[in-house]
Image (spheres, helix red, strand yellow):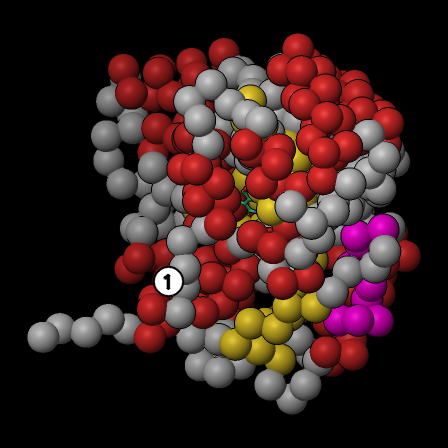
Amino acid sequence: MTGFADRVEHVSISGIRKVFEAAGEDAINLGLGQPDFPTPDHARRGAIEAIESGMADAYTSNKGTLQLREAIAAKYDRDYGYDIDPADVIATSGGSGALHLALETHVNPGEEVIFPDPGFVSYDALTRIADGTPKPVPLREDLTLDPATVEGAITDDTAAFVVNSPANPTGAVQSEADMREFARIADEHDVLCLSDEVYEHILFEGRHHSPFDFAETDNVVVISACSKTYSMTGWRLGWVVASNRRIERMLRVQQYGQACASAPAQYAAEAALTGPQETVREMVDTFERRRDLVIDGLTDAGLEVPTPEGAFYAMPNVPEGWCDEVLDRGVIVVPGDAFGANGEGYARLSYATGTEDLKQALEIIDDATRAVR
Ligand SMILES: Cc1ncc(COP(=O)(O)O)c(C=O)c1O
């Protein structure tokens, strides 16, 4: 009888999926991990025109089209003043594809990968798929990741640590001082810092900071995507930016595992990145208004919740039985322990859903909280 590889047997199906399966058909869904906005028209048109002219019929370069990589480099110059060589970019199948490339390329069997707990579910799973050893670390009270915690968890076997700001599932944003520290840790300990920046534009206060800006070595690899910024989760287009020697290694994984990112998606992404950016601002303004509504509602219900400064999630501290009670009353939330053992006692609420639904959900949450107290 054929068996299965241990690396796959040790990965379970995401707890988020389980909640969706348990929910009734007309439940209000605060479990979603994608913006509830359409992809901008000019991005869609970029793909349509490429398809109609036959440009999207063939493989592109393994790294992605030069025009797309130039658009990604120009984006980094426009947003942060970085000087990125388009040769140091690989277009991937979403941020997920980029995370996979980075971990496959940098983690030897048994080597450790440190990541936030609670944190995005893929860090644990992709570490296992790379035959690495997951090393989840707890967060501060305000749900940010303390560089000192990361530094304390580094051993001789550490290959990488993951920084994610703004973060899923917490909405927390790391300070500039933290990012400087993460860069220093990557430099001094000679470990890879994987900076997952897929929510870089969904930020309500201040500006986005990356350890990439502060590192003196090439030990920081940046991952981002069109998925959240342009509401393009279905298009599957992300990228990784790193030094040339790292890109050339990651390209070996990309070349044989994927060949290249989907060509129509590459043309859509190029149009999204080079076209008007107003839709991003409008979406972020809407998320900020909803964030305020949700935080007020949760606080009025008597729950403690750090104010998220980015992404579209809130993560309140909840009493025992709360998630089941809320789900029974028709509101889908994700129990915090779906994001790691330290997520127990929390729940993730996504406000990527309309205001009227949010208001109704908050009323239900208020009643449910009273019922379990
Ligand atoms: C923190 C984080 N990183 C990466 C991803 C993957 O994004 P993509 O849809 O571009 O693969 C997600 C998706 O939810 C995410 O929340």
Q: Which residue: 44% across, 81% down?
A: 109
Classify mark 1: helix, strand or loop. Answer: helix
Q: Is residue 172 left or right of residue 332?
A: right
The residue singled out by tag 1 in the image is: 253
Q: Is residue 157 left or right of residue 247?
A: right
Q: Is residue 367 left or right of residue 341?
A: right
Q: Which residue: 68% across, 61% down?
A: 342
Closest to the observer: 171 or 157?
171
- Is residue 286 found inside the magenta-colored segment of the image? no
Vertical comparison of 178 with 317: above or below: below
Q: Quadrant of residue 74?
A: top right
**Residue 161 image point, x, y percent:** 65, 68
Vertical comparison of 40 with 194: above or below: above
Closest to the observer: 307 or 218?
307
Quick one: label 1, few (<14), some, or many (20+) residues within 10 Å? some
**Residue 324 image point, x, y percent:** 58, 40
**Residue 92 image point, x, y percent:** 44, 46
The kind of residue on which mark 1 rests is Val
Q: Quadrant of ligand 1?
A: top right
User: Is ligand 1 less than 8 Å from the beta carbon at label 1?
Assistant: no
Q: Quadrant of the N terminus?
A: bottom left
Q: Which residue: 42% across, 14% down?
A: 45
Magenta-tinted stretch:
142-150
